[in-house]
Image: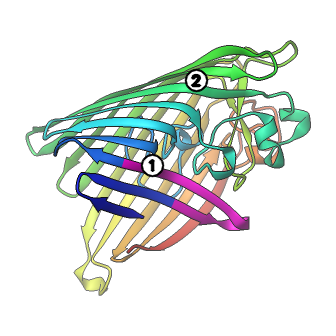
């Protein structure tokens, strides 16, 4: 839903999902100071990494499941954009309530218990507070290539309700988008660290993440590095009637975990997007290993240990999505 009145604007995305789930991917009231700068208040999208999505396909990749894609919180965001620079700064005192989260976020077992495993997740009691996000990109042309290079930072308190103590979270990313004719290449590298202040007997090697319950809650390695590479090719298709264009794409992402003995998580998607506006469709073929929706969800281990059922096995999933946009 979008609306505009003079210098004010409204933008909100509300999702109706399977099993009577609901989600909000953004919801804010904006005020434009001029053509280049704006303030958004409410639940504005969190500025970090590749935007608006960390991949070309409909199937979300590792950055999304670790909280670095299509994520938001309650707070405010300032943005400045001209022909060359795009700067965003945001502050989120609290994350969205778990019942309406579109993207996963760190959460307490008490908030995620309907979608968590008590024996494995029951003592997880961390949540982010007072998160700050900064994102800066620079656009430029080099020969036939139109390019965007940027960097992102995020930091917050990691409050533990059991110990009533604050740990910390930080993440840093470098990202780029490169376009030449029908080709688009996007890539990013992310380093993140959670330092929880857990009570005795609770491992500091992982934190619990979850959303509105559309998928089960899962554990994430507390420290790791993420890499992603996406390649897309646009092809005009006047011979396909209402389908005027298709995009062929390959998305790949990988998570390297700091903890010794925890093998990498990987995802790869090959797919095609159909443009028949106002209808669009995505057909994805995704392979994943040590990834939560592809094996890890069977036992709640998510993106951590590789000693559980399905570890180091490649899982395959086909996803077809059709949307009507108006």
Dot 1: element = strand
Q: Main secondary structure of the magenta part?
A: strand
Q: Quadrant of the N terminus?
A: bottom left
Q: Nearer the viewer, residue 186 or 217?
A: 217
Q: Residue at x 60, y 26 (%)?
A: 129
Disc 1 crowd, CA 10 A, few/some/many (<14, 14-19, 20+): many
Residue with the mark numbered 1: 251
Q: Residue furthest front?
A: 6
Name the residue rendered at 62%, 47% in the picture: 288
Taking the view exactly as shown, the residue that stands out farthest to the bottom is 241
Give the mark toward the camera: 1 or 2: 2
Residue nearer the viewer, 270 or 132: 132
- Against 283, is 192 above or below? above
Residue 24 image position (x, y, % from top left): 55, 54
Colour scheme in use: rainbow
**Mark 2 sits on what residue?**
224
Q: Secondary structure at mark 2?
A: strand
Extent of the magenta region? 14-29
Kindly identify the residue that appears in the image at 39 percent across and 46 percent down: 230
x, y percentage for residue 80? 24, 36
Tell me if I can see residue 82 in this picture. Answer: yes
Residue 47 in view of the camera? no
Screen quadrant of the C terminus:
bottom left
Decide whether residue 27 is among the magenta residues: yes
Q: Is residue 267 magenta?
A: no
């Amino acid at each position: 839903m979008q609306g505009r009145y003079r210098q004010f604007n409204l933008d909100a995305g509300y999702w109706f999902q399977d099993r009577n789930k609901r989600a909000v991917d953004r919801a804010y009231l904006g005020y434009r100071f001029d053509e280049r700068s704006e303030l958004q208040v409410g639940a504005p999208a969190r500025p970090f990494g590749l935007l608006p999505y960390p991949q070309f396909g409909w199937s979300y990749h590792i950055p999304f499941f670790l909280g670095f894609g299509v994520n938001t919180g309650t707070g405010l965001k300032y943005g400045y954009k001209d022909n060359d620079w795009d700067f965003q700064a945001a502050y989120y005192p609290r994350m969205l309530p778990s019942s309406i989260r579109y993207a996963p976020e760190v959460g307490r077992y008490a908030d995620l218990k309907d979608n968590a495993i008590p024996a494995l997740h029951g003592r997880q009691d961390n949540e982010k507070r007072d998160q700050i996000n900064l994102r800066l990109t620079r656009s430029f042309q080099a020969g036939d290539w139109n390019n965007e290079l940027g960097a992102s930072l995020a930091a917050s308190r990691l409050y533990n309700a059991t110990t009533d103590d604050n740990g910390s979270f930080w993440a840093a990313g470098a990202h780029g988008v490169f376009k030449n004719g029908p080709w688009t290449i996007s890539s990013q590298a992310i380093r993140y660290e959670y330092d929880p202040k857990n009570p005795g007997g609770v491992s500091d090697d992982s934190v619990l993440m979850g959303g509105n319950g559309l998928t089960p809650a899962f554990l994430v390695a507390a420290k790791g590095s993420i890499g992603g590479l996406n390649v897309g090719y646009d092809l005009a298709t006047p011979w396909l009637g209402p389908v005027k264009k298709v995009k062929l794409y390959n998305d790949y992402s990988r998570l390297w975990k700091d903890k010794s003995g925890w093998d990498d998580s990987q995802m790869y998607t090959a797919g095609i997007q159909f443009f028949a506006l106002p209808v669009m469709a995505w057909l994805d073929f995704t392979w994943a290993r040590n990834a939560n929706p592809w094996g890890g969800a069977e036992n709640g281990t998510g993106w951590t240990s590789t000693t559980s059922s399905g570890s180091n096995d490649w899982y395959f999933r086909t996803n077809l999505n059709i949307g009507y946009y108006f």
